[in-house]
Amino acid sequence: MTEADEKTIQDLRRSGILLTTLEDLYNWGRSNSVWPLQFGLACCAIEMIAASMSRFDIARFGSEVFRPSPRQADLMIVSGTVTKKMAPQVVRLYNQMPEPKYVIAMGACAISGGPFKQGYNVLKGIDRYIPVDVHIPGCPPRPEALLNGLMELQEKIREQNLTGENRPHHLRSDVSGEFPVPEFGACDLEPPSNPAVWTPPEPIREGL
Amino acid sequence: MESAEQLRDRLLAAFPEARVEVLANPAPVAQHSLIIGATHAVQIATLLRDDPDLAFDYASNVTGVDRPDQEIKEKVTVKETVDGEEKEVTKEVTRTEPGYLEAVYHLYSMAKRHGPVILRLRTENRTDKVTLPSLTPVWRSCEFQEREIYDLFGIVFEDHPDLRRLLMWDDFEGHPMRKDYVEPDDYEWEPTPHDAVLIKAKRPADGEEAAPLAP
Amino acid sequence: MIPGVSIEEKTDPLQGQILEVSMGPHHPSTHGVFRMDVKLDGERIVSLKPVFGYLHRNHEKIAEDVSYLGSIPYTDRLDYLCSLTNNWAYCLAVEKLSGFEIPERAEYIRVIVGELTRLVNHTCLMGFFVQDLGAMGTPLMYAFREREKILDLFEGLTGARMMCNYMRFGGVRCDLPVGWIDEVKKVIAAFPRFLDEFESLLTQNEILIARAQGVGVLSKELAINAGITGPCLRASGVGHDLRKVDAYSIYSRFDFKVPIGAHGDCYDRFMIRLLEMRESLKILDQAIAALPSGQIIDPKAKSRGLRPKAGEAYGRIEAPKGELGFYLISEGGPSPYRYRVRPPSLINLTVLEDMCLGGTVADAIATLGSIDIVLGEVDR
Ligand code: SF4
């Protein structure tokens, strides 16, 4: 197909002819039926439920089908504080999700530990173990913010190519969607982070 | 309801060998508490529950308190013989007040609608003699709360039906609610702006030299 | 081999096998990250051990490190459905510790927002409960529709939907905005209609009755001994409501009843909440009618840099889930020496095993739903 310019496409659409690429069509379908895992961790989960209820109605974006089983889900919304005791289960659930899979870190806690960062049992950000696609700040983020985050994710999905470096994981054989599950250690998780996805910055201790 | 002193006298009348002391609470609410010796704790608790005048049928809040060893500096006057002459000398001595762990029980009565009576049980020290009798056989509501104290403070409750860690995982080491618990070091700790927290924030990393504290 | 499932051979081959199932911490029918280790003989539960700690966020340890004032936002996040009553309980404990007086108007405002919080909590709980019974979606949608109306009120008053951070030692943070009371009146005038609708939809429902009546029975004696509080206790026939017993704040001025159940089963626990909401509406009406003008915070009270004199205090209120208490020990420092939350949700779970033994897994789900737990408070 030769490159059709935007104006021709719009003209054709007005007369009832839809001209698109397979890639666009494929991503359009994928991005508008992102099924989240029914998975709540803490306070933010209540706002996630509120987003799926009548007032905010996440169904407008095709994501109302909350799946109880990770095997049927495309999206994991990490909504709330991930404690060290819970982190292995979160990673295990992520591993059980089929490709292509995406992660939204919802709320300050999932991003960095949030208000509970100083706690001895709080994981300081889920991105220490699994890759996160969209971060939504807030404590808790309003349901509108979650919807915005979901739209960002849809945008991200639409931009993925079916070929080349940027193609989604399910079309590549060279990457694995499984991440090592941390183990319980004497007073922390072993290892405290997954070096493949996250490296700790150098501690800055001056000026305190 | 009876005052703490009356209650102490009543308990001492029933158990003359028991240790029962009143610990005054200077706060405006004046909820005074009773320090109970571990040997008679279960009998005293049963009496408090079953006596028809007291009827403390409901143990509301059970918690632990950690009191680490304290260094106390005080001035003492001693008689000394200096050059054959007896003199009174004031000296500053440091003595260490031994620390202990404490379990605190808040009791109320649903039948009589009075309370609280506060019981305090103390362990002998913080290291090896940390057993206390469990009051779960008297009040079921202590079950999870005593497990929590065992988990976070390290008090071992004898005769508890199911003494396991409640909140942390089973292989966890240490008791995190103790005052001297040191968390695993993380580059991301955040200082809060006062006193002990600030000092902790300035704690050097392993192998580094201690940063001088700001005046 | 399915993870979390193991089979144990019994000695008598005719008796079959005991199946050990670990339900949770991610399970669609647990209210958050809660886990139950269940042993099943056929479909009957022979042992059920709750496992906690998956949301243990070290609230108490952090509170012993920050100032008294700095703990108020953390209390919001304990029981995240009822942040305002959590604030209230904590402020009450600090007020007892340092002897602040609360002005009349502040007390009224506290009662109004407290009872609104009770409405929010009970509506949500009923939605979640019937969802656990299998009514996916619809009742929960109704409940959340009503919740949003009250959350809008909270947002107008405090600026936040869920985490209100509104009360202060000796009063409240800011006065009511202009027109707010009128909005409250509108919401509570419309509320009985929702309750009627919910009641006619559910209370006579065949399935609800079959799933809830006679399930998860809790006896009065066990309930008292195990320290159960709140609607669960009252459903077992004990008329213990701290609003009457302690008459804290100004609750002695209002005319309201304490509903009591007769059977202690899931159905009673469900109905008690429905009735309590009607009583809360009565209190709201009276409080709004009598709302005085005046100060909203004790001028002597100090929020920033508060250093109460050495001593200790235990303050408790009737939160929607039961007796929420805060135990504070001060050594005169800027943060409490010991800070302890008495979590009603955790203690109400003490009897979960007793209530579920001999029942089926489906009954255990219903029982758990009717106890009303929030994991933020269970694990803190
Ligand atoms: S970010 Fe805030 S609201 Fe969300 S889970 Fe953490 S504490 Fe709760």
Image: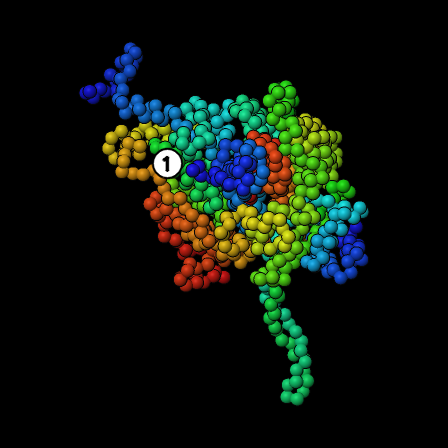
The answer to whether residue C13 is above or below residue B1 is above
Of residues A178 and A169, the one drawn nearer to the viewer in this rendering: A178
Q: Could you tell me which residue is drawn at 39 percent across and 53 percent down? A: A203
- The answer to whether residue C176 of the structure is visible from this angle is no
- Under tag 1, what secondary structure? loop
Q: Which chain is home to disc 1?
A: A
Q: Quadrant of the N terminus of chain A?
A: top left
10 Å crowding of disc 1: few (<14), some (14-19), many (20+) = some
Residue C315's image quarter? top right
How many numbered circles does the render carry? 1
Residue B18 x, y percent position in the rendering? 74, 60
Residue C138 x, y percent position in the rendering? 54, 22
Of residues C65 and C10, the one drawn nearer to the viewer in this rendering: C10
Q: Could you tell me which residue is drawn at 53 percent across and 58 percent down? A: B180
Residue B32 x, y percent position in the rendering? 72, 53
The residue positioned farthest toward the top in the image shown: A15
Q: Could you tell me which residue is drawn at 43 percent across and 22 percent down? A: A60
Q: Could you tell me which residue is drawn at 63 percent across and 36 percent down? A: C355
Of residues C255 and B140, the one drawn nearer to the viewer in this rendering: B140
The answer to whether residue B19 is above or below residue C261 is below
Residue C345's image quarter? top right
> Label 1: which residue?
A133
- The answer to whether residue B167 of the structure is visible from this angle is yes
Of residues A145 and A1, the one drawn nearer to the viewer in this rendering: A1
The residue positioned farthest toward the bottom in the image shown: B84
| Ligand 1 under 8 Å from disc 1 Cβ | no
Q: Quadrant of the C terminus of chain A?
A: bottom left
Q: Specify whether C273 is left or right of A183.
A: right
Q: Amino acid at mark 1?
A: Asp
Colour convention of the picture: rainbow
Residue A189 x, y percent position in the rendering? 43, 49
